[in-house]
Image (cartoon, helix red, strand yellow):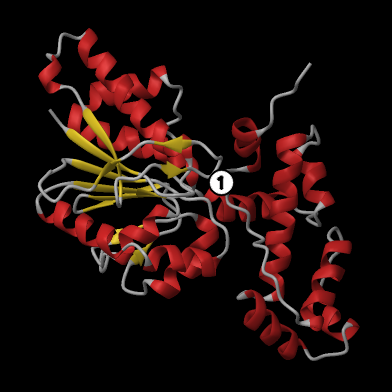
């Protein structure tokens, strides 16, 4: 009987804690239907650092058991937490020394450790991910790289696995993680049945298609702010960086240097990403042809637009629309 620990913390997402357990329950149902004896089914315990109930981010209070030194688990799941700012999140991480020690002990005894979204930071804090491949939620990539420089962070995959350490990207990847570990513990057939019955799309293997290229970076650089505003207002025009620099009364070299310092990308890359993100929104919500969308975002050559789109997003514009266009509501 695989025994699973599902950790809980104040401000955890209830949907992730409960949802992961629900996936185990669905797996048990499929195994029971196929004649698996009850001794072979999953058992799971909800655990907190001190055994006290936790209050999830939506206000739901969940009862928990205490971490037990004597209990060995086959799988430990670390859920995501609602992010309320970097300073507060760091304070949470610093308060989890006992949990970190417990996780290390469980892993050394042979357990799989599975961490979702912001929960990957707690797993990385154990040091177990050092020199191993991992992923995390795309919007905290910078903080993760800064805090854990020894981790081989790959932000593109939705799920990674290295030496019984499974990491998931943004929040909803817990469903893919559940299928991933079900495959390990219950076999491919059961994992596939669970995915089908729960309508989980197993082809969504990367975060890239849903990841905005333009990340909101708060800054106070007036030159970059003016440049961003001008590029947003003149999206469809043919823009030369030399001309933009002249409009802003600076050298092209200064413009590039300031963009790299503030946004960690060149003005040209920023413009291309702005155009691609705008095109994605139009593909998701409208009926304009790919040609018209390309023109709207400043590309007269449809092949150049399609090539850049596929390079940045991983799909052609047509394939992206087919997959991600919002359904029409009558």
Q: Is residue 184 above or below residue 130?
A: above
Depth check, front residue: 291 or 189: 189
Q: Is residue 27 left or right of residue 173?
A: left
Q: Residue at x 23, y 63 (%)?
A: 128
Taking the image as drawn, is residue 113 in sight? yes
Residue 116 falls left or right of residue 225: left
User: Which residue sits at x=10%, y=47%?
Assistant: 70
Residue under the point 78% across and 36% down? 289
- Asked if 271 appears above or below 320 in the picture, the reply is below
- The percent position of residue 63, horizontal first and vertical second, equals 36, 36
The residue most toward the front is 52
Rendering coords of residue 40 (x, y %): 12, 22
Q: Nearer the viewer, residue 315 or 56?
A: 56
Residue carrying label 1: 209
Question: Does residue 327 sit above or below 177 in this rendering?
Answer: above
Residue sitting at 44 percent across and 41 percent down? 173
Q: Quadrant of residue 329?
A: top right
Residue 233 at x, y percent in the picture = 88, 63
Residue 278 location in percent, x, y? 75, 51
Q: Residues within 10 Å of mark 1 (few under 14, many from 20)?
A: some
Residue 178 appears left or right of 270: left
Specify whether 301 is left or right of 8: right
Dividing the picture into quadrants, the one containing residue 264 is bottom right
Residue 30, picture quadrant: top left
Q: Secondary structure at mark 1?
A: helix
Which quadrant holds the N terminus? top left
Q: Quadrant of the C terminus?
A: top right
């Amino acid at each position: 009987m695989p025994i699973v620990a599902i950790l809980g913390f104040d401000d955890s997402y209830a949907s992730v804690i409960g949802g992961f357990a629900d996936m185990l329950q669905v797996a048990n149902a499929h195994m029971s239907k196929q004649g698996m004896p009850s001794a072979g089914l999953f058992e799971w315990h909800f655990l907190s650092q001190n055994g006290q109930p936790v209050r999830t981010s939506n206000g739901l209070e969940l009862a928990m058991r205490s971490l037990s030194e004597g209990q060995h688990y086959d799988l430990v799941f670390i859920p995501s937490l609602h992010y309320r700012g970097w300073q507060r999140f760091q304070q949470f991480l610093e308060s989890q020394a006992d949990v970190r020690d417990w996780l290390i002990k469980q892993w050394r005894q042979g357990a799989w450790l599975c961490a979702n979204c912001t929960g990957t930071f707690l797993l990385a804090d154990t040091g177990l991910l050092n020199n191993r491949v991992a992923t995390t939620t795309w919007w905290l990539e910078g903080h993760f790289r800064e805090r854990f420089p020894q981790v081989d962070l790959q932000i593109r995959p939705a799920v990674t696995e290295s030496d019984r350490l499974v990491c998931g990207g943004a929040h909803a990847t817990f469903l893919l993680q559940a299928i991933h570990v079900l495959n390990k513990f219950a076999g491919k057939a059961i994992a596939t049945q669970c995915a089908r019955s729960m309508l989980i799309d197993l082809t969504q293997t990367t975060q890239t298609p849903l990841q905005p290229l333009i990340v909101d970076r708060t800054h106070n650089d007036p030159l970059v702010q003016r440049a961003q505003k001008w590029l947003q207002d003149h999206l469809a025009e043919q823009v030369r960086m030399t001309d933009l620099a002249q409009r802003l009364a600076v050298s092209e070299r200064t413009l590039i240097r300031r963009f790299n310092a503030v946004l960690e990308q060149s003005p040209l890359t920023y413009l291309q990403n702005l155009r691609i993100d705008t095109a994605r929104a139009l593909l998701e919500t409208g009926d304009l042809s790919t040609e018209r969308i390309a023109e709207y975002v400043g590309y007269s050559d449809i092949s150049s637009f399609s090539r850049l789109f596929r390079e940045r997003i991983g799909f052609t514009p047509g394939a992206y629309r087919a997959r991600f266009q919002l359904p029409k509501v009558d």
